[in-house]
Structure formats: structure tokens, C-alpha cells
Amino acid sequence: MRLLLTNDDGVGARGLAVLAHAVEEWVAGAPGGQERAAIVVAPDRNYSGMSAAVGDVFAQPTVSYRRHRVEGAPSLPAYGLDAPPALCAIMGALGAFDLVPDVIVSGINAGANVGRSVLHSGTVGAVLTGAQLGLSGIAVSVQWGEHVHYDTAAAVCVEVLEELVAAPGRTVFNLNVPNLAREQLRGVRRARVSTAGIVKAAGPRAGGRPLADEGELPLRLGAATPSLGDVSDEEPDEDGALLVAGYATLTPLRGPHEDTDPGLDATVEAALRVIDAHLRQP
């Protein structure tokens, strides 16, 4: 089993270092006859909120890199790339760094990725990108706080690795862990993605006056922020509510794919007829 480690907080981030240390120990503890290896291919700086963006690779078809030494994991080869997480995932998955991985592990993100933040997260975007190339993967995030228990998140993640490699190809998990010491964790639960958003409101325009030609619009942040806001409107089995209740949450995700819902067939056929009729007009 070969792991590709990445993140969106940058190759020097504390969360990645803790995860890499746990993975290094996992590699060293391989039972006899089992191959284990890992490599770190991560952005050289913070790319939070980039989702699965790769940047303008047409204008810039090369990527600068530099070898790094990840604190606490000296035996793992590590590279920092001038690239967002999804592009790091692509290059790592294609074997640009002498290891072709089976699984991609992204994190540990500094802050929960629940609700609609799943769509925007670079941590999640990296594993969804890996899945497009045939890899299974897990995105790991921990609730933000004054002292962040990255070690708890790393311990939970390592426990999942064997199950992940045995799962069907392209399996993707989103793992969120509350900011608690391991002994305080109430357990792990499967969670549904909630409707919590990162941005709850933009503006508003005071008194409904027209906008000036330029200026700034304030954002009001919602529950799906790194430390989690009010989740009282969530169902008990939704990711934010479970996290606040002290449970780590595991959610299977699926990346972009064709929508094969038969209920859409009539809509698609109608759209095709309209387009075809317009194209045939002289």
C-alpha cells in the first residue's frame, strides 16, 4: 500500500507534520510481507478554499518544486510545489515523484470541513481529484481551537487506512474530528453533509442604497467555519451537529459524474430539440 500525503495549508503546516509522523510510524509497523510506503507532495504555501482548482496550466505548463523535510517524519520523501492541492494530487498520482500511490490522504486541515464547505475545501478537493485518477482517498480535518489536537485526528485517520485500501476503487471519505484529546472523543459516526455554509450573508446594503462604483462588502460567516458556529438547526446525524457533540464523523463522498437520473431525460431531450432547431435556422 502506497500513500500520497498532501494538504491545502502548505507543506510546512503543523497538521501535515503530525499526520506525516503518524503515517511514518504506520509504514514502519507494516506486518511481515506487507509493503507500505508514503510520500508527501503538498503546496509550498496556503491554498485554503481552492477546492479542486489547478490554476491556468495552459499559460504555465511547468510546476516549480523543492524538496522538504517534514518535521517528525524524516524518512518520508517530501516535496513542496508551487501548485494548489488538486494539482499536487494529480502530479503525485501520476508518479511524478517516483512513487505511484494507491491512496491519497489529505490534511490534517486546520478547521472542520462540514456542510457546504466540503464543496470549497482544498483538502477535500485534493482527494476528489485523486478519485478521478482512480485513487481512493480520505480528507482529514480537525475542529479549530486555541490548542488543536492534531494528534487525535491523525490517530483516527490511521485506523481507517486499512479499510480504505480494501474498499472499492475511487472510494472517498471526508473525516472530521472534534478538537478533543483522544480519551475525550465520544466515538466515530457516519454523518450526512449538512446545509451549513461558510458565508451566511454578504452585505447588506444599508437602507437599500445603490452600491458605489467600488468599495467593500462585509461577509457574515455561518456555522461551517473552522471552529464551527451555531449548529442548532442541524439534524442529529449531520456532520456539524455530530462534531459539536464530540463525535468524529466519516462521510463518503462522490466527485463530479454524469447525472443518469431518468427523470432528467425529458428535460435533456427538450433542450436538444431547441438547440438543434436554432442551429438549423439560416
Image (cartoon, rainbow, N blue to C red):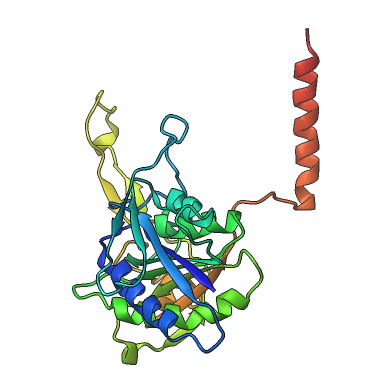
Q: Is residue 260 left or right of residue 178?
A: right
* Residue 19 in sight: yes
Q: Nearer the viewer, residue 154 or 207?
A: 154
Q: Residue furthest top?
A: 282
Q: Nearer the viewer, residue 96 or 4?
A: 96
Quarter of the figure with the N terminus = bottom right
- Numbered label tally: 0
Q: Name which residue lies at 53% across and 64% down.
A: 101
Q: Name which residue lies at 81% across and 28% down.
A: 273
- The picture places residue 66, in percent across and down from the top left corner, at 30, 51
Quadrant hosting residue 132: bottom right
- The picture places residue 179, in percent across and down from the top left corner, at 30, 78
Q: Residue furthest left?
A: 146
Q: Is residue 11 left or right of residue 162?
A: left
Q: Is residue 147 left or right of residue 242?
A: left
- The picture places residue 83, in percent across and down from the top left corner, at 37, 46
Q: Is residue 258 left or right of residue 216?
A: right
Q: Name which residue lies at 49% across and 72% down.
A: 238
Quadrant hosting residue 246: bottom left
Q: Nearer the viewer, residue 248 or 214?
A: 248
- The picture places residue 52, in percent across and down from the top left corner, at 47, 49
* Residue 245 in sight: no
Q: Nearer the viewer, residue 192 or 99?
A: 99
